[in-house]
Amino acid sequence: MRVLWFSVTTSLYNDKRNIHNGGGWIDSLERIVVDNNQIDLAVAFVENSLDIPFQKVESEYVTYYLMGLKRNLFQRLKDKFSFADIDNETLLRCMSVISDYNPDLIHIFGSEWCFGLIKEKTNIPIVIHMQGCWPTYRNAIYPPGFSKINKYFENIFNFHKIFQQIISEKQSKYRARREEHILRINNNYMGRTRWDLALTMLYNKKSNYYYCSEALRPEIADCKGKWNSHRVEPMEIITVGGSNTLKGYDVVLKTAFLLKENSDLYFKWNLCGPTTQDMVDFEKKTGIKCRDVNVFPLGRCSTEQVKEYLLSSYIYVHTAYIDNSPNSVCEAQYLGLPIIATSVGGIPSLFSIEYPTDFLIPTNDPYYLASKILQLNKDKNLLNKLSELNYKTAQNRHNKETLYQSLMECYKAMINLH
């Protein structure tokens, strides 16, 4: 079986250069496929430094296609106003790769990028592996205190920033419309949450949906350590994620403030992802300084650092306004951490049916979140119960053999249907 992946990261090609933590599950899945040695695999991705259609690099187990997409100054300026031209160029590169490799099946990671448009250009069966969904993210992009108009007023004397904001909004609308079109024209989807399934059926009620969970980064998946409830002072809370408004860091600050004002809990709240500078906007909007409420932005952390922070923490908290199946939550579960998470998007699907729903909380409710943190601090039996439920669920879900079998079942079903 010849399978071609279109990836938004370089996967395992020169993986030392691939520092984007968010794409770690793609190269983890590549490792699993290679270890089983039953698929002839090719991985294609965009390489902005090349000005040729593609560069083919064959390793012992995988063929890599570096799709050249070097843009001159005029093209880069044009791309700021519309993605249409760069999308068309990317699709031409994709079709060149397809022609060269001649796969039995095409596997696209994510519906957010233009790769899914190749459905209109080839009859080869295609499956899209759902990640996020930009239309839904746009719907939740401005939490309380944030707004598009407010951002304009903040930069009223800075024409450059206002211009950037106008362009960014235009690009965002284009991305949302493009993704909705991709979801309508494609028939096969791979996912792991009820949210995935609901969205794909919303846009294409005749689509086929296959279950396949995400592979975890090997530093986590192969970790022999497991969380335990041994308490140290201060009690450490951990949150891992990007630095954008969707992740709910305003809720983190408000919750930390409530804990300081209304309890004697001695805590430290670590944030893996956002920097001190990233938190400035959240501090302004809430009127709460990180340093005043024991919140510590750590910036980008390596996988090893994330693992160590998780194992040394007492509770994992996820405050996102929208999310599908965040790897950060999956990794915390895999190590057995008790978790409090917002009940949005695909997040509820990640938890056992026995998991107490009190700990899957409403969005933007720092008061309830603070009370749940205090409850877990006082109830060690409950803390251990949440830990065991998470550990068992995640160990089963992210089992490498199970993942591979799910992937193969999807591939075989699609080829048989074609």
Image: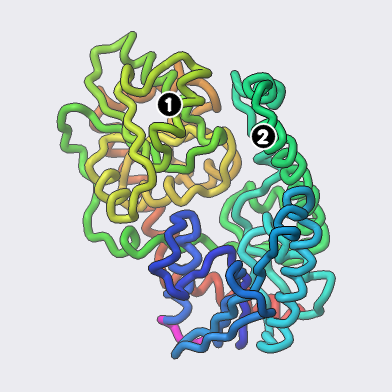
Q: Can residue 205 be seen in this view?
A: no
Query: Crowdedness of circle 1 by 10 Å Cα count: few (<14), some, many (20+)?
Result: many
Is-magenta flag for residue 37? yes
The secondary structure type at the circle numbered 1 is: helix
Of marks 1 and 2, which one's residue comes earlier in the chain?
2
Query: Crowdedness of circle 2 by 10 Å Cα count: few (<14), some, many (20+)?
Result: few
Display coloring: rainbow
Front-lying residue, 270 or 226 = 270
Q: Which residue appears at 55% of the width and 72% of the height? A: 407
Front-lying residue, 264 or 171 = 171
State the image quarter where residue 272 is shown.
Answer: top left
Q: Would you place residue 165 above or below residue 336 in this image?
A: above
Question: Horizontal and vertical percent for residue 340?
Answer: 41, 33
Question: Horizontal and vertical percent for residue 39?
Answer: 54, 85
Q: Would you place residue 91 above or below residue 130 in this image?
A: below
Question: Where, quadrant-wise, is the N terminus in this rendering?
Answer: bottom right
Front-lying residue, 362 or 77 = 77
- Stretch of the chain drawn in magenta: 35-39
Q: Name the residue under label 1.
A: 252
**Predominant SS along the magenta part:** loop
Q: Mark 2 points at which residue?
A: 160
The secondary structure type at the circle numbered 2 is: helix
Q: Would you place residue 357 above or below residue 261 in this image?
A: below
Q: Would you place residue 410 above or below residue 344 in this image?
A: below
Question: Horizontal and vertical percent for residue 326?
Answer: 49, 48
Q: Which residue appears at 71% of the width and 66% of the height? A: 115
Front-lying residue, 285 or 108 = 285
Q: Which residue appears at 81% of the width and 78% of the height? A: 122
Query: Would residue 382 be found to the left or right of residue 4 on screen?
Result: left
Is-magenta flag for residue 348? no
State the image quarter where residue 150 is shown.
Answer: top right
